[in-house]
């Protein structure tokens, strides 16, 4: 079930973001960013899971913002940011969990106005799509299966956040001939 579910989430987000021209056809490879998923995910889960019931779009969407932020930090000054043990807590504590999206948009990604609104709509749509797919599974809440599915959604949103940001910064994943 886990692989099928992850493929379903991945394929839906991939097709949506590709259609929006927010990612390239070929998904990026950025080991410095992808390797941080485990520590960021485990640090984020207590906050995200607590908020999921009342605010599923925020709980899921914040992880996409985090993926974008880590990609941006990687591009800017990774030799500094790679030394921060818990990047999630570092970002969360700037303005608090509830304003994590604003902090990342304004202070990390440096987007304002229409660009910020466009990015917020994109993230919200991805979070909503992931949540819809999760709900369609009819998994019993509070079970290990539900937890694993939630983490799968977070992981995919993190990776797609990275992909969106890398493209926004001009990294294009194209096959070299």
Image (cartoon, rainbow, N blue to C red):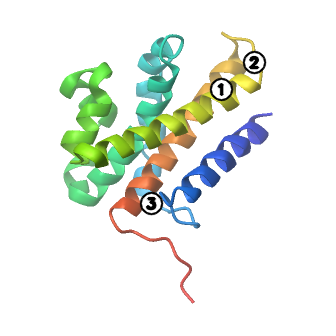
Q: Is residue 175 above or below residue 113?
A: below
User: Which residue occupies the foreground of this view, 34 or 159?
Assistant: 159
From mark 2 to mark 3, how far is it between C-alphas? Answer: 32 Å
Q: Is residue 91 left or right of residue 157?
A: left
Residue position for label 1: 148
Q: Position of residue 123 (x, y in %)?
A: 45, 39
Q: Nearer the viewer, mark 2 or mark 3?
A: 2
Label pair 2/1, CB-CB below 8 angstroms: no
Q: Nearer the viewer, mark 2 or mark 1?
A: 2
Find disc 3 in the rendering and name its residue.
Answer: 30
Most extreme residue toward the front is: 114
Which residue is pictured at 33% across the width and 32% down the height? 88
N-term-proximal mark, 2 vs 1: 2
Q: Viewed as shown, does residue 112 lie left or right of 133?
A: left
Front residue of this view, candidates 92 and 83 = 92
Looking at the image, is 4 positioned above or below residue 100? below
Q: Which residue is mark 2?
A: 139
């Amino acid at each position: 079930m886990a692989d099928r579910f992850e493929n379903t989430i991945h394929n839906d987000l991939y097709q949506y973001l590709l259609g929006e021209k927010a990612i390239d056809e070929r998904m990026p490879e950025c080991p410095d960013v992808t390797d941080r998923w485990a520590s960021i995910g485990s640090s984020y889960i207590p906050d995200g899971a607590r908020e999921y019931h009342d605010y599923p779009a925020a709980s899921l969407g914040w992880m996409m913002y985090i993926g974008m932020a880590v990609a941006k930090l990687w591009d800017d000054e990774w030799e500094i940011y790679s030394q921060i043990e818990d990047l999630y807590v570092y970002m969360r504590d700037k303005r608090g969990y509830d304003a994590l999206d604003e902090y990342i948009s304004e202070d990390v990604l440096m987007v304002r106005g229409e660009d910020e609104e466009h990015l917020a709509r994109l993230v919200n749509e991805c979070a909503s799509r992931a949540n819809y797919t999760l709900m369609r599974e009819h998994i019993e809440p509070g079970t290990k299966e539900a937890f694993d599915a939630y983490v799968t959604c977070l992981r995919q949103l993190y990776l797609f956040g990275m992909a969106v940001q890398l493209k926004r910064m001009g990294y294009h994943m194209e096959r070299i001939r």
